[in-house]
Image: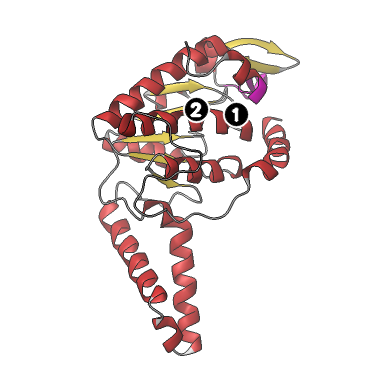
């Protein structure tokens, strides 16, 4: 039995690729047909490759590996934060800062700065400072939370990186390749499969497609550590990673409309 059924993928729109004029020829083996000028992804292959990715992540999780999820486009941001938190992984869902992995020592100092500011804020020290100084520190803390909140508990480089859109996250891909970190990624029909180690041909623009794939990958990581699926929204971190609030269900229709525009 496959991890995701063909019916589930069809309902989520996993099969919709980009317009044929925008394709990457290297994706040809994963394309089933062309319909009305749009490439249709071969879901039979997606199901098999999804199984491969699932078992790879579960095995890696069982052996104690750590994972980083990356997805900064609007359709992916909330999902990445939610699912990474649920399976005890790290995430970047706003903007990839240059050197997040290749210059980890410097990034780690900024994370320590964030933790220090949060401790001072929670202890009430900000309230004792002059208003202007407190406001400046609060803005600094909020900015660090926005970009580094998902890495707050990461004390070393991850072992595996899960990416939603390798074209958008080009800098993250480059850093992973430089460090030899394996990449598991959704691949739309405009992507280069040579950039990733574990490909999952799928629509990376529609929120329902991204949600379906990423949640199953998070399940694999969770099961590797705990042997069973947690309740939706359950986090296995000792403390919940900071994340901007996203209402995934309420924004689904709008984001799928945005996805259609991106496909054009």
- Tell me, yes or no, whether the highlighted magenta stretch contains residue 80: no
- Tell me, yes or no, whether the highlighted magenta stretch contains residue 15: yes
Q: Determine which residue is flagged by label 2.
A: 186
Q: Position of residue 34 (x, y in %)?
A: 68, 12
Q: Nearer the viewer, residue 112 or 177?
A: 112
Q: Which disc number belongs to residue 234?
A: none
Q: Secondary structure at mark 2?
A: strand
How packed mark 1 is, by other alpha carbons closer than 10 Å (few <14, some 14-19, many 20 or more), is many
Whether label 2 touches label 1, CB < 8 Å: yes
Of the two numbered discs 2 and 1 on the same chain, state the one appearing first in sequence: 2
x 28%, y 36%: residue: 159
Give the residues drawn in magenta, as a range. Answer: 11-23
In the picture shown, does residue 227 fall above or below 179?
above
- In the image, 206: left or right of 261? left
- Marks counted in the figure total 2
Q: Nearer the viewer, residue 206 or 12?
A: 12
Q: Nearer the viewer, residue 198 or 220?
A: 220
Q: Determine which residue is flagged by label 1.
A: 209
Q: Position of residue 237 (x, y in %)?
A: 36, 48
Residue 112 in view in this figure: yes
How packed mark 2 is, by other alpha carbons closer than 10 Å (few <14, some 14-19, many 20 or more), is many
């Amino acid at each position: 039995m496959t991890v995701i059924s063909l019916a589930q993928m069809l309902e989520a729109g996993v099969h919709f690729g980009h317009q044929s004029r925008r394709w990457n020829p290297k994706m040809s083996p994963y394309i089933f047909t062309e319909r009305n000028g749009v490439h249709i992804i071969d879901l039979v292959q997606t199901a098999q490759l999804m199984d491969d990715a699932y078992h790879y992540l579960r095995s890696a999780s069982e052996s104690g590996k750590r994972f980083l999820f990356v997805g900064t486009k609007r359709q992916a941001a909330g999902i990445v934060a939610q699912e990474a938190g649920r399976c005890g992984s790290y995430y970047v869902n706003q903007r990839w800062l240059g050197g997040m992995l290749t210059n980890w020592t410097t990034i780690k100092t900024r994370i320590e700065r964030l933790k220090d500011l949060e401790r001072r804020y929670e202890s009430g020290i900000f309230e004792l400072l002059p208003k202007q100084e407190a406001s400046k520190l609060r803005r600094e803390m909020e900015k660090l939370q926005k970009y580094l909140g998902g890495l707050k508990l990461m004390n070393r480089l991850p072992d595996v990186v899960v990416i939603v859109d390798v074209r958008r996250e080009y800098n993250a891909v480059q850093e992973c390749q430089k460090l030899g970190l394996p990449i598991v990624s959704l691949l739309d029909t405009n992507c280069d499969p040579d950039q990733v180690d574990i490909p999952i041909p799928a629509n990376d623009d529609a929120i329902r497609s991204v949600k379906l794939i990423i949640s199953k990958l998070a399940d694999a990581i969770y099961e590797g550590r705990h042997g069973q699926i947690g309740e939706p929204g359950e986090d296995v971190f000792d403390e919940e990673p900071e994340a901007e609030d996203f209402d995934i269900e309420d924004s689904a229709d709008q984001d799928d409309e945005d996805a259609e525009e991106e496909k054009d």
